[in-house]
C-alpha cells in the first residue's frame, strides 16, 4: 500500500515537473472546480471581480483609461465590513480561471449592497457590460464577460426544473445539484451562427431596431435543435435577408454573454454578385445594406469612444465582438486583393 502510494506520489511529482505552465494551470483549475475545500482555500489568495446587478466594477488608471477592477480577497473582506456586510460573503464568489502566474480569479455579485458606497470604497465605477467592452482591453473583456455569464446562470438556475426544489451550488460554481432529484445542472451556452456575407467587393451588414443608433453588425441567429452550423447559417441568411450563400469559411468562435450566454460560431460566406438584392424580414431586422470597402475602413478606424458624444452615422461592434473580427478579416482580404 505504502509502496503504491509512494509510486503515485513520485509519478505526480514527475508529471508536475514535466508539465508546461499551461498544463499545470489547467490541472490546478480542474482541481479547484471539483474540490470544494481546495477552492475555498484558493479564494483566500485570489482576486475577485465585483458586479452590481451584473454591471462590472471598473477603475480609472493614472493615465486616464479604465481597467477591470480585480480586488484581493482580503481587501474586499475589509471593504464589505465597511459597507455593513459580513466578510464571509466573499465565499459566495464563483471561480473564473487563473492568471498566467497561477493566481485564481473569481466573480461576486453585490447587487444587494449600496452601489455608491461600494464605488467610493473601491475607487471605481459599476459600468453596463456593453459599454465596458468599449472601455477595456480584449483579454479583460473575455474575463468580465465570463464572470457576468456565470453570475447570471446561477441567478436563473436556483430551482430544479423537475422537482421545483432549490438547487445547491458547489464551491467553485461549476455546477448546481438538486438534492431531491439528484439532477446536476451545468452552465449552458446557446449556439449562435454569425456570418459576414460578401458579394466580392461589398459586405452585407444589418441592424435590429434594438441596436444603438448607427450600429450595424454581421447576420446572426440561434441554431435550431438538431441543426449543424452550416444548416443554421444557410437558413438564417435565407430567413433574414432572402439570399442563398455559398463558399462558407469558418473563422473562429467566441463566448458572448448576451442574451443568456451564446456560443458564437463565425464564418465568411459569399453570394453570386448577380443575386445581391436583399429582401429583409422586417420582424427581425430594421435594415440590411451592402457596404463598400471605403465605408467599412472608415467605420473600423472610427469606433465611438465616448458614450456621451453623438455616435458616428455608421459604426460596427467593438473590437472584442467576433462580428468586428469578421469585418476586420474581410477588410484585410479586400486590401490584399486591391494591391
Ligand atoms: N459577439 C458578436 O459579435 C455578436 C453577437 N450576437 C449575439 O447573437 C445573438 C443571436 O443573434 P440574433 O440575430 O438576435 O438571433 P436570431 O436571428 O435567432 O433572432 C433572435 C430570436 O430568436 C429566437 N430564439 C431562438 N432560440 C433562442 C435562444 N436560445 N435564446 C434566445 N432567443 C432565441 C427568439 O425569438 C429571439 O427573439 C444575439 O442575442 C447577440 O447577443 C449578435 C451579433 C454579433
Ligand atoms: Mg438574427
Image (spheres, rainbow, N blue to C red):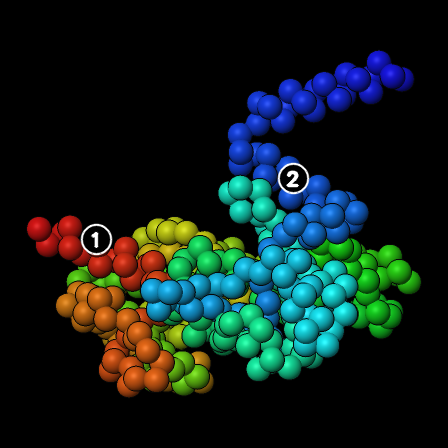
Residue depicted at x 28% and y 71%: 303
Give coordinates of residue 114: x percent, y percent.
64, 82
- How far apart are the alpha carbons under marks 2 and 1? 41 Å
**Quick one: label 2 or label 1, which is nearer the N terminus?**
2
State the mark number for residue 333: 1
Q: Could you say which quadrant of the image residue 237 lies in?
A: bottom left
Residue plotted at (38% across, 69% down): 134
Query: Which residue bears the numbered disc 2?
Result: 28
Q: Residues within 10 Å of mark 1 (few under 14, many from 20)?
A: few
Pick the residue in front: 28 or 150.
Answer: 28
Q: Kindly state the secondary structure of the residue where label 1 is placed.
A: helix
Kindly identify which numbered label has been placed on residue 169: none
Left or right relative to 191: residue 213: left
Q: Position of residue 23 (x, y in %)?
A: 57, 34
Q: Nearer the viewer, residue 251 or 95?
A: 95
Instruction: Give the residue drawn at x 58%, y 73%.
Output: 121
Residue 336 screen position, x and y as percent: 15, 50
Amino acid at each position: 500500500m505504502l509502496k503504491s502510494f509512494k509510486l503515485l506520489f513520485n509519478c505526480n511529482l514527475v508529471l508536475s515537473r514535466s508539465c508546461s505552465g499551461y498544463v499545470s494551470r489547467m490541472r490546478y483549475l480542474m482541481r479547484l472546480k471539483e474540490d470544494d475545500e481546495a477552492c475555498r482555500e484558493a479564494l483566500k489568495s485570489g482576486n475577485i471581480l465585483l458586479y452590481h446587478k451584473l454591471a462590472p466594477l471598473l477603475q480609472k488608471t493614472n493615465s486616464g483609461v479604465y481597467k477591470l477592477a480585480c480586488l484581493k480577497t482580503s481587501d474586499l473582506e475589509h471593504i464589505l465590513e465597511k459597507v455593513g456586510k459580513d466578510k464571509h460573503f466573499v465565499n459566495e464568489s464563483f471561480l473564473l480561471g487563473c492568471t498566467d502566474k497561477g493566481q485564481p480569479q473569481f466573480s461576486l455579485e453585490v447587487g444587494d449592497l449600496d452601489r455608491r458606497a461600494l464605488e467610493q470604497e473601491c475607487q471605481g465605477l459599476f459600468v453596463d457590460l456593453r459599454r465596458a467592452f468599449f472601455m477595456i482591453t480584449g483579454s479583460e473583456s473575455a474575463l468580465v464577460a465570463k464572470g457576468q455569464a456565470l453570475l447570471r446562470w446561477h441567478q436563473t438556475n436556483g430551482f430544479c426544473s423537475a422537482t421545483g426544489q432549490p438547487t445547491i451550488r458547489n464551491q467553485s460554481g461549476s455546477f448546481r445539484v438538486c438534492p431531491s432529484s439528484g439532477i446536476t445542472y451545468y452552465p449552458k451556452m446557446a449556439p449562435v451562427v454569425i456570418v459576414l456575407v460578401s458579394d466580392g467587393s461589398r459586405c452585407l451588414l444589418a441592424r435590429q431596431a434594438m441596436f444603438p443608433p448607427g450600429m450595424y453588425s454581421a447576420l446572426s441567429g440561434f441554431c435550431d435543435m438538431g441543426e449543424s452550423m452550416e444548416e443554421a447559417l444557410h437558413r438564417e441568411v435565407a430567413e433574414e435577408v432572402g439570399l442563398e450563400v455559398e463558399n462558407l469559411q469558418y473563422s473562429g468562435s467566441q463566448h458572448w454573454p448576451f442574451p443568456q450566454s451564446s456560443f458564437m460560431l463565425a464564418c465568411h460566406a459569399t453570394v453570386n454578385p448577380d443575386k445581391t438584392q436583399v429582401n429583409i424580414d422586417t420582424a427581425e431586422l430594421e435594415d440590411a445594406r451592402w457596404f463598400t470597402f471605403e465605408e467599412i475602413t472608415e467605420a473600423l478606424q472610427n469606433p465611438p469612444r465616448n458614450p456621451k458624444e453623438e455616435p458616428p452615422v455608421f459604426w460596427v461592434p467593438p473590437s472584442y465582438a467576433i462580428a468586428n473580427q469578421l469585418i476586420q478579416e474581410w477588410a484585410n482580404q479586400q486590401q490584399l486583393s486591391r494591391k
